[in-house]
Amino acid sequence: MLWFRLALKMGRTVDELQRSMTSAEFGEWIAFYSIEPFGDHIADIRAGTIAASVINPQLKKDSTPYKPLDFFQWADPPEQPSVAPPPEAVAAGVFGVNLAELKASGKKKLILRRKP
């Protein structure tokens, strides 16, 4: 999913990003996203915060205050990773590499090439 958010943010296709971005840089994007998420769902939450800030002071004292997510039709916010995924998950999801098998084989270096 992060590939698509990055592609939207950078005005490029996912394929262009995957061809030009190193795994190290992508790992840094994963870490950055875990610290500071971005995307339309985050913009919605910001807008909901503003709406709640405007409406809540006008409610009666015994009323339940609105929360930012009360202003959106999607019921549950998208699940946000609490920490960056483990390297094994990134290697398997992005490159299709099983790190446990790679470590067991004793190889010290892995060269990834995109199929033509």
Image (spheres, rainbow, N blue to C red):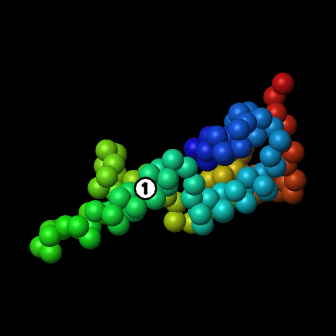
Residue that badge 1 annotates: 47
- Report the front residue among 97 and 8: 8
Q: Give residue 61's position: percent from left, percent from top.
A: 15, 75
- Image point (35%, 58%), residue name: 51
Q: Tag count in the figure?
A: 1
Q: Is residue 12 left or right of residue 49?
A: right
14 w.r.t. 111: above or below:
above
The percent coordinates of residue 64 (x first, y second) are 18, 68
Q: Is residue 27 left or right of residue 79?
A: right
In the image, what residue occupies the spot 80% across and 46% down?
A: 21
Q: Is residue 109 visible?
A: yes
Looking at this view, is 57 or 108 the one in front?
57
Taking the view exactly as shown, the residue that stands out farthest to the top is 116
Q: Residues within 10 Å of mark 1 (few under 14, many from 20)?
A: some
Please say whether residue 85 is visible from this viewpoint: no
Residue 26 locus on image (x, y percent):
73, 52
Expressed as whole percent of the image width and height from the top left, the position of residue 1 reads 58, 44
Res 62 quadrant in image: bottom left
Q: Residue furthest front?
A: 58
Q: Is 91 in front, or is 8?
A: 8
In the rendered image, the residue lying farthest to the bottom is: 61
What SS does tag 1 mark? helix
Q: Residue at x 23, y 67 (%)?
A: 58
The image quarter containing residue 28 is bottom right
**Label 1 sits on what residue type?**
Ala
Residue found 28% across the figure and 62% down from its top: 55
The image quadrant where one finds the C terminus is: top right
